[in-house]
């Protein structure tokens, strides 16, 4: 049994690695700058947050890019400048010329921008946005004419010195294009000091990074939400099985009767309805005193951390607010369990060993409970393998509906704020929970079926 589970666990590790690669790649597909500050307005704050997010490190262990781009491109900040220079180098091929022009422009801007007004200021901006040396020629002439008009001799000399270096760099850029470099791929090795490696090891060690918006560690951001979500998922799972298993066995015991057909129709209708519709109906029936019974309060519980209470105390004080989200999930997924149990029990009751048991004179109750029950558990176990992660994912929608302080509301706010590290940390949590559900299902299979244990003992 233990060796079987270890083999399954080892099989889950590469699966989790593939999921982490896909998740990390998706989290870096956006073109927007992840830093919530403008570099021009708050350069120090921008650089500090960029280093905190490790944007100055390479993405992966290696990179495959054209020969026109250097292996140190990731060190350039801000991100918008990095992309602009990469486009210029990809177009012209000569990174040395592009880098030389940009450094001369940055030095000229640092010296001249405080004194440049009107056309001179616009010319500096045009030089920054220029896509070719020819495009930078006209604003270069405007700046040279402006420098000649400066009354301060020291400032005029300083301006001409910077503009001469800038013009020399622009001329070199125009004279030595190397477009052929953009056609050749080059592999750069970056080692383990990269963002993916640090993100993966941090996730394994419980430190999966920081939030782009708040700058707080993701564990501090997600832990209270995760606890609340797991709590209502646990309640929903227990309720779903407590309702679904007896109901499915009842329908199997009295199959093809009128109440079996009626229950199946009702369960199929319940399952076919969207979970958000079911939650809305339950809210109207059970939580609204003006329209319904008013037995329960809504799911808008106070956030755990803001309450200042221990988690168990907070859960006890808000227990009545957990019932509607948990009941919504339990009814929706309990319908699946009931149908699976009925199908499994009906198939088990038609097998040869059941006919043999009946031929021996065993009572129908003994046949049903002693022989058919365990064999009919397999659909339930199969259901558990995917119900656990599906329940977790569905609870995100239900939490948003009931304004419950769990992962669902956090996911919605993170999506609105473009807080991608939080979003993709949730994806990884869901992947881990999915694999955990599969491992538990495998263990239940081994417990329920002697043939699985025999296969384990024989090394299959």
Image (tube, rainbow, N blue to C red):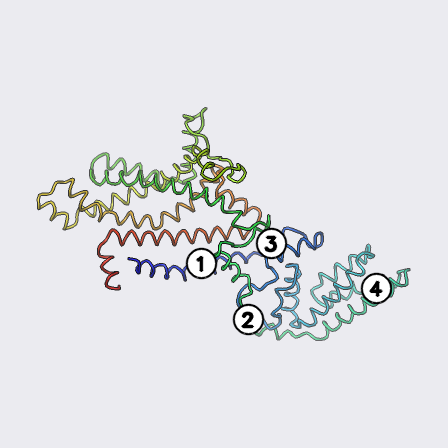
Residue at the far top: name it: 290
**Numbered mark located on residue 377 in the image:** none
First in residue order: circle 2 vs circle 4 = 4
Asked if residue 347 is positioned above or below residue 198 in the image, the reply reads above
Asked if labels 4 and 1 touch by Cβ distance under 8 angstroms, the answer is no
**Numbered mark located on residue 19 in the image:** 1
**Cα gap from disc 2 to disc 1, whole angstroms:** 23 Å
**Numbered mark located on residue 189 in the image:** 2
Residue identified by numbered label 4: 159
**Mark 3 Cα within 10 Å, few/some/many (few <14, many 20+)?**
some
First in residue order: circle 3 vs circle 4 = 3
Q: Quadrant of residue 10?
A: bottom left
Q: Position of residue 110 (x, y in %)?
A: 77, 60
Under circle 2, the secondary element is strand
Q: Quadrant of residue 18?
A: bottom left
Q: Position of residue 90 (x, y in %)?
A: 63, 68
**Cα gap from disc 2 to disc 3, whole angstroms:** 25 Å
Q: Quadrant of the N terminus?
A: bottom left
Tell us which disc is closer to us: 2 or 3. 2
Residue at x-position 40% and y-position 42%? 233
């Amino acid at each position: 049994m233990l060796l079987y589970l270890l083999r399954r666990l080892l099989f889950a590790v590469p699966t989790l690695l593939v999921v982490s690669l896909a998740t990390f790649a998706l989290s870096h597909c956006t073109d927007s700058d992840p830093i919530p500050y403008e570099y021009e307005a708050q350069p120090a704050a921008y650089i500090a947050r960029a280093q905190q997010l490790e944007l100055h490190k390479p993405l992966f262990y290696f990179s495959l890019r054209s020969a026109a781009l250097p292996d140190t491109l990731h060190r350039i900040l801000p991100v918008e400048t990095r992309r602009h220079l990469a486009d210029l180098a990809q177009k012209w091929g000569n990174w040395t010329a592009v880098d030389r022009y940009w450094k001369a422009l940055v030095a000229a801007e640092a010296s001249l921008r405080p004194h440049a007004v009107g056309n001179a200021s616009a010319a500096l901006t045009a030089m920054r946005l220029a896509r070719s040396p020819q495009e930078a020629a006209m604003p270069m002439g405007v700046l040279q004419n402006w420098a000649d008009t400066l009354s301060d001799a020291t400032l005029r000399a300083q301006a001409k010195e910077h503009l001469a270096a800038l013009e020399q760099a622009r001329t070199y850029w125009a004279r030595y294009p190397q477009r052929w470099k953009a056609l050749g791929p080059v592999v750069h090795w970056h080692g383990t000091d990269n963002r993916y490696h640090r993100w993966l090891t941090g996730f394994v060690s419980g430190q999966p990074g920081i939030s782009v918006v708040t700058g707080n560690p993701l564990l501090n951001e997600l832990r209270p939400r995760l606890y609340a979500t797991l709590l209502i998922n646990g309640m929903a799972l227990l309720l779903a099985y407590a309702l679904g298993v007896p109901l499915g066995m009842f329908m199997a015991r009295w199959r093809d009767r009128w109440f079996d057909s009626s229950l199946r129709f009702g369960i199929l209708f319940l399952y076919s309805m969207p979970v958000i519709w079911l939650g809305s109906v339950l809210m109207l029936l059970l939580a609204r005193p003006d329209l319904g019974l008013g037995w329960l309060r809504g799911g808008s519980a106070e956030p755990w951390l803001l309450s200042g209470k221990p988690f168990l105390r907070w859960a006890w004080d808000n227990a009545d607010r957990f019932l509607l989200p948990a009941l919504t999930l339990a009814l929706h997924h309990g319908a699946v369990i009931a149908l699976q149990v009925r199908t499994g029990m009906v198939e088990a009751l038609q097998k040869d060993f059941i006919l043999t048991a009946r031929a021996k004179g065993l009572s129908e109750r003994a046949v049903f409970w002693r022989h058919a029950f365990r064999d009919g558990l397999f659909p339930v176990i199969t259901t558990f393998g995917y119900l656990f992660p599906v329940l977790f994912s569905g609870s995100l929608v239900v939490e948003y509906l009931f304004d419950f302080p769990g992962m669902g509301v956090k996911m919605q706010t993170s999506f609105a704020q473009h807080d991608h590290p939080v979003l993709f940390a949730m994806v990884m949590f869901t992947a881990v929970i999915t694999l955990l559900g599969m491992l538990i299902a495998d263990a239940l299979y081994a417990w329920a079926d002697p043939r699985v244990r025999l296969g384990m003992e024989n090394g299959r």
